[in-house]
Amino acid sequence: MGERNRKYRIDTEENREFLKGITENLLSFGHGFPSPKGSSYYLGDDGTPWKDRNRETWITSRMAHVYSIGTFLGHEGSKELAAAAIRGLREELHDDKNGGWYAGLTAEGEILPNKQCYAHAFVILAASSGVLAGVEGAKELLEDALNLYDLRFWNEEEGLSCDTWNTEFTVLDDYRGLNANMHTVEAFLAAADVTKDEKYRIRAGRIIDHVLGWASENNWRIPEHFTKEWVADLECNKEQPADQFKPYGATPGHGIEWSRLITQWALSTYKNDQEGAKKYIETAENLFNRAVEDAWNADGAPGIVYTTDWEGKPVVHDRMHWTLAEAINTSAVLYHVTKKEAYAESYAEFMEYLDEKVLDHVHGSWFHQMNEKNEVIGTVWPGKSDLYHAFQATLIPYHTPELSIASAVKEGKEI
């Protein structure tokens, strides 16, 4: 194994140092995100805020989460940055009249319509991390976010969450989707770790059981879009397959992300029951292996294609940075949990690709979107909106997989 390879190989000192450097780079890159009242600007190619774009709740939440973790890592200014984002969530992005959080604000401060489950899940994640970091107002934010989510988004009978309300919470959209439910699982696991209320972990498991049922019936390619009766709509957006939040077909990056979340849930739920955990971890492996087989290097160049059809053929060939981040996370987690060498090999491949193609060695952060030739483009994700996926990918590989990442970093639970 040459020196160059060691940098990319899991459990080497060289790889740990490589990731630490990226962590610090990302935290430094994002310092310009807070607007005067705390909501997050969308970051441009060199970290300069794009002030003419909307300031969205999900991005603000992600930045609160990232800089809360930054406080545990000793990154200077992190607590103040986390506090700014938490303030933005408690004040200008919060709907004091109808409850919940606006989707965001325009550059002029106008309200973006609708109440998104996706955004509310990220508010829970942000508040959970903020509580751990001791950020002022985070505890109240978490209580408010969990109560609101219970009231408006969680369906106890179905064991799933709805997707989108109008701003006043009077009209519920018929669309149901798994992206919001995936980030709900993430948020519920974080909330369970922070509040010690296990009902959120149990709810996460109910969502996971639904997803595994749909995936196992579909060759481990997860349907993303559903009717209000939770019937899969496999043809959704076939005419506009690159939709930013509702792309057509299977999204391999989500298969990979689900794999890690299922593993985390199983390990934290079946702490004293290896057989119980094993059953779920095997399904997580099925999801990861299907996604990587379909999407990695699928068109003659390295990278993970954004979407495939239901036979696993690429539809949108672009490479989104978040899919690589999740592949790094999940390959590391599955290697540490199963000890299977194939996952270590995948991790090394992903690391090399990150270094050679996706890291912006000039301006910092990661290129957010590349085409099938690995040229930087911006049709779906111009600029470098936030740090969340990339930042987590520098930490999850070396922290205990049964804990949410903020809790694991705070507790120093390293592998």
Image (spheres, helix red, strand yellow):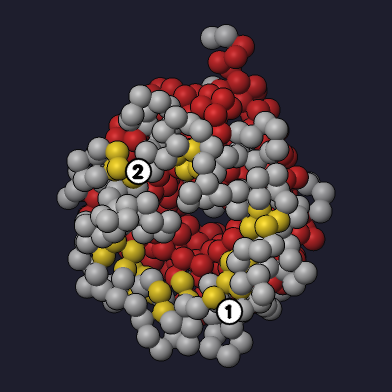
* Residue pictured at 29% horizontal, 76% vertical: 174
* Residue pictured at 70% horizontal, 33% vertical: 362
The residue carrying mark 2 is: 316
Q: Measuring from the top left, give residue 169's x and y in whole percent.
A: 44, 85
Looking at the rendered structure, the secondary structure element under dot 2 is strand
Which amino acid type is marked by label 2? Val
Residue 74 sits above or below residue 59 on the image: above
Closer to us: 43 or 284: 43
Quadrant assignment for the N terminus:
top right
Which amino acid type is marked by label 1? Ile
Identity of the residue furthest to the left in this view: 217
The residue carrying pointer 1 sits among few (fewer than 14), some (14 to 19) or many (20 or more) residues within 10 Å by Cα, namely: some
Q: Measuring from the top left, give residue 407's x and y in whole percent.
A: 61, 53
- Can residue 238 be seen here? The reply is yes
* Residue pictured at 75% horizontal, 45% vertical: 28
The residue carrying mark 1 is: 111
Identity of the residue furthest to the right in this view: 76
